[in-house]
Image: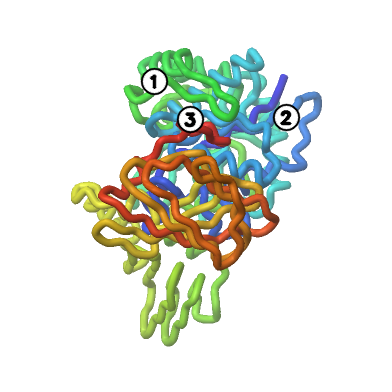
Amino acid sequence: MNFAPVILSGGDGVRLWPLSRELHPKQLLSIAAKKTLLQETACRLDGLALEGIAIDPPVIVCGSESRFMVKVQMDEVGRHDCTIILEPAGRNTAPALTLAALEITAAHGDAVMGVFPADHVIREPHRLHQTIQRAIPLALKGMIVAFGVEPARAEPAFGYIKKGAALKEHGANEIDLFIEKPGLERTREWPGSGCCWNSGIYICKASVWLEAIRRLRPDIHECAVKAHGEGMRDALFFHAGELFRECPSESIDRSVMEKLGGGSAAVLPLDAGWADAGSWPALWNLLEKDENQNAAWGDVFAKDTRNSLLLSETRLLAALGLEDVIVVETADAVLVAKKDRADQVRNVVKWLKEKKRKEHISHQRVFRPWGYYQVIDAGERYQVKRIMVKPGQSLSLQKHMRRAEHWVVVKGTAKVTCGDDVFNLAENQSTFIPIGAMHRLENRGAELLEMIEVQSGAYLGEDDIIRFDDKYKRP
């Protein structure tokens, strides 16, 4: 029997807008630690030992748009052999887990899955390991084991688990009642009542999950099976089939956990410093605070300000005489909200979508597998970008049919291909890429390559690109 960690890394992180965007969601951000939330999720299993059970590389389920950032981040922490399953569209956690279970079953016949959301913080991983070890015997008996956290407050955004009869094994209880996001009034009396928060972490056999979803939500099961069956595999990813778009969107909790009968699900207490990092108030709870209970990040000045989250990404943020507020500054958007209204940031994102704006989709700094670019200025028929290429990385061999480009090296050395010419550019040197010329930019050096690119032409959209060769296998 194998243990297969499944990391659910989908979602667009709406509750952390404007820092989180569709193309760079919260799980790919490093806010509360040096590593990103996704990297922390993968690395917290380091040192886990299960007697008689082999531990596999993680299986990660994420959106297709995030695939290269996920791959790069996993490579950075040494998870080169992880399996990355790509959803053509987000359909919540139940369909995502079903895809993972089908992939694991295809590889092993069956295995015990550990299901880990990528947007949580766990301060004491060794305690998580102990709880996993206690859950394995229950999972091998055919139970789905949820990890419950002692509630610190009434929290309507979390799922709640009411404990049932005690089980002999390892301090577990049957699940008497499972309620996903029950609302504020129902949660006020639950701290200290024996109910616990649902951490979102589950342990069960892949076959047990597949049977549960087949029985309780056959529409999700059927659609996921078809999407996995028509999926395509390349050197880096497994691409689920387009039929996945038709899958009903529902969570693990609503599709299965709320409906399971007694004896088929258990809850184990998790005391490992668990915290959700999915909202601004949650992030304020996680971050280190000053003597006035302000959590500040970036270039921030605060006076006569208390109990606030102040986050600056690109410029000075000065806060005077504020209390219980959230202020988040990015290059193209600023959020100012009372802390108790932070959940309404969803309304901002909804409005942006209705107005067909772009501030919910991507930052001005756009990450690519080779590094990133940032739009500095733009106008009619021109655009200026700052381009950063990581050591050893290269852009695709490509051409543009509607724009020319002027490149100036600011730092490092660039290897440039332009038509039949291949040459190096050092700091303060420049070159011109004509419309229609086949070209490539490479960083063969040991330091970051920084360039300024000036684009000019009738059309400057990112879709004006024809790739001829690409190390990241992009189309």
The secondary structure type at the circle numbered 2 is: strand
- The residue pinned by badge 1 equals 220
- The residue pinned by badge 2 equals 55
449 relative position to 23: left or right: right
- Which amino acid, mark 1? Ile
- Name the residue nearer the viewer: 109 or 261: 109
Of mark 1 and mark 2, the one earlier in the sequence is: 2
- Which amino acid, mark 2? Ile
Residue drawn where x is 31% and y is 58% of the image: 382
The secondary structure type at the circle numbered 1 is: helix
Residue drawn where x is 73% and y is 42% of the image: 46
Q: Name the image quarter holding residue 264.
A: top right
Q: Is residue 137 above or below residue 24?
A: above
Residue drawn where x is 45% and y is 67% of the image: 313
Of mark 1 and mark 3, the one earlier in the sequence is: 3
- The residue pinned by badge 3 equals 86
In the image, farthest residue toward the left: 355
Instruction: Tell me if label 1 and label 3 are in contact, CB under 8 Å.
Output: no
Q: Is residue 136 above or below residue 221?
A: below
